[in-house]
Amino acid sequence: MTRHWNVLEKAKPEEIQDLQHKIGVEEPIAQILWQRGIRSMEDGRSFFKSGLQDLHDPFLMKGMDKAVERLQQALEEGQKVLVYGDYDVDGTTAVSSFYHFLSSFYDEVDYYIPDRYQEGYGVSFQSIAFAAEQKVQLIISLDCGIKATEQVARAKSKGIDFIICDHHLPGKELPPAVAILDPKQNDCPYPFKELTGAGIGFKLMIAMKARMPFIETDPFDYLDLVAISTCCDIVPLIGENRILVKYGLLALNRQARPGLAALLNRAGKKEKLFVSDLVFAIGPRINAAGRIGHASEAARLLLETDEKKLEELSLAIEEKNQERRDLDKETTEEALKILRSEKNFAENKSTLVFSENWHKGVVGIVASRLIEQVYRPTIVLTKSNGLWTGSARSVRGFDVHEAIDDCATDLEQFGGHKYAAGMSLKEEKLESFKKHFEESVSKRITEEKLTPKLNVDLELQLSDLTNELYKWLKALRPFGPSNLSPQFMTRNLVDAGGTRHVGDGTHLKLEVKSKSQDPNPITINGIAFGFGEWQEKLKSGVEFDLVYALEMNEWKGRKSLQLMVKDIKLSSAHT
């Protein structure tokens, strides 16, 4: 897929000199900071030096006082409390952390994670019936509930109160809960709007401890789980989220809780953990429990301490993750075949594919895979409990939730946010929904948003790539949405003689140098995953341009800078 290289705006020289003077960084780092909205000494202090003391007061969140009062009442009266959460990584970590916290000082508490296939997303009527049977008087929902108006009303009719901790967009009507904690409510004054469900549960823990002196358990003991939810739910890694992930990673690297240690061991992770490890090693394994089986298995693992049970649970989850990977690959291939056989494939602005044979647990992943191949807003549906059920994923800058909202009359239910959503609909509405979704996307999307972009922070020469630059790049971590790992462009490079295929032949090990008359030009190595077909072209002596991230490679005790290549173009393509 051809991508547009979008070189980000550079600051004026006087602005950069001012920022260098205030913060004390090299020019390239000052440019990167400026591009990320860091323009003052205070901005710089907040970015580099912010700590747990800079987290906002939880009582700034609308509903927090009511939530704590209702919990205090439950504890004083010995009421049965049910901790309820969604079946994805955010929901599972939220339930595990809040249940562990509450059960450390209160016995009348249980947890519930809905079955993806029998109950679907969010608060289910089945769970309300279960709660009533168990004489539950208070449910705390985490990472879901903001649109569960009917379900919360049903619970209320049975004498069950709700505290909703959610971070999804509210609907036009709010559920009749005792308290709703969701910073995305229009009238919520909480300064940071991008916490995950686990992050909001964490805030509730802090508020409880502040008002209930008998609580000895430290909410900050759960920063590892909050960090995992934050990284895996793809929320902006700025503000409070940056602090939570920074300290959560410190906790994980200091000593992972037993369940996470077992997962990491299965994944073969023994070195220092970074955001990418949470996203690509821990997240898929926690998700696999709910996608292939039941998410409560992942919650049990996160709460377990017995070595034998940890071994059994982690093995079961590893097997489910492998099954999930196989299904992912097979379903993606089938979906692409269906998609490319459609009459209007080339003209469509959206993708909607469906098959009753696909596993419900992988449709979200497959939607993301399809966007990698065919860059446009995508929905993948399968049959579940008599309904077409599925997931939507979007392209950069396009609000797929708004597009689905345009089609609400076709749907039984839907929910989500700008870049990801879920929905269900009846058989007779399928073609209507497909037609209306295409119309909505066509009306809202621009050609620019249908062209994948590769953002380039700066254009550099190979001589700019120094150990000092890399040291400052490390200081910008943790990387994630809204603070992505900086990407650089260097033009007019040539093969230095060492470029070759690696792995199964689909990847390249690069050795490049600048096109220069210098008898001793700078040479640097790089890795280009998925660019194996470029070998002959590069070896022919043509000049080419690279977009890359800068990393440190360590081999047999020796460290050297290395390019992690994101894209390659012939230099002539820019002339």
Image: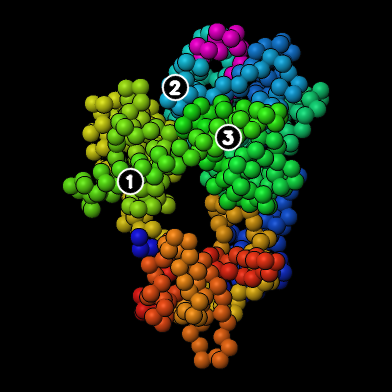
The amino acid marked with disc number 1 is Glu
Left of 476 or right of it: where is 359?
A: left
Left of 253 or right of it: where is 11?
A: left
Q: CA distance from mark 2 to mark 3?
A: 26 Å
Check residue 137 for magenta coloring: yes
Of pointers 1 and 2, the one earlier in the residue sequence: 2
Disc number at residue 119?
2
Q: CA distance from mark 3 to mark 1?
A: 28 Å
The amino acid marked with disc number 2 is Glu
Residue at disc 3, secondary structure: helix
Disc number at residue 248?
none
Residue marked by disc 1 = 333
The residue shown at (39%, 70%) is 534
Task: From the viewer's side, name the closer residue of 465 and 194.
Answer: 465
Residue at disc 1, secondary structure: helix
Of pointers 2 and 3, the one earlier in the residue sequence: 2
Of pointers 3 and 1, the one earlier in the residue sequence: 3
The residue shown at (46%, 31%) is 292
Disc number at residue 315?
3
The residue shown at (68%, 69%) is 558
Range covered by the magenta-colored residues: 128-145
Residue at disc 2, secondary structure: loop
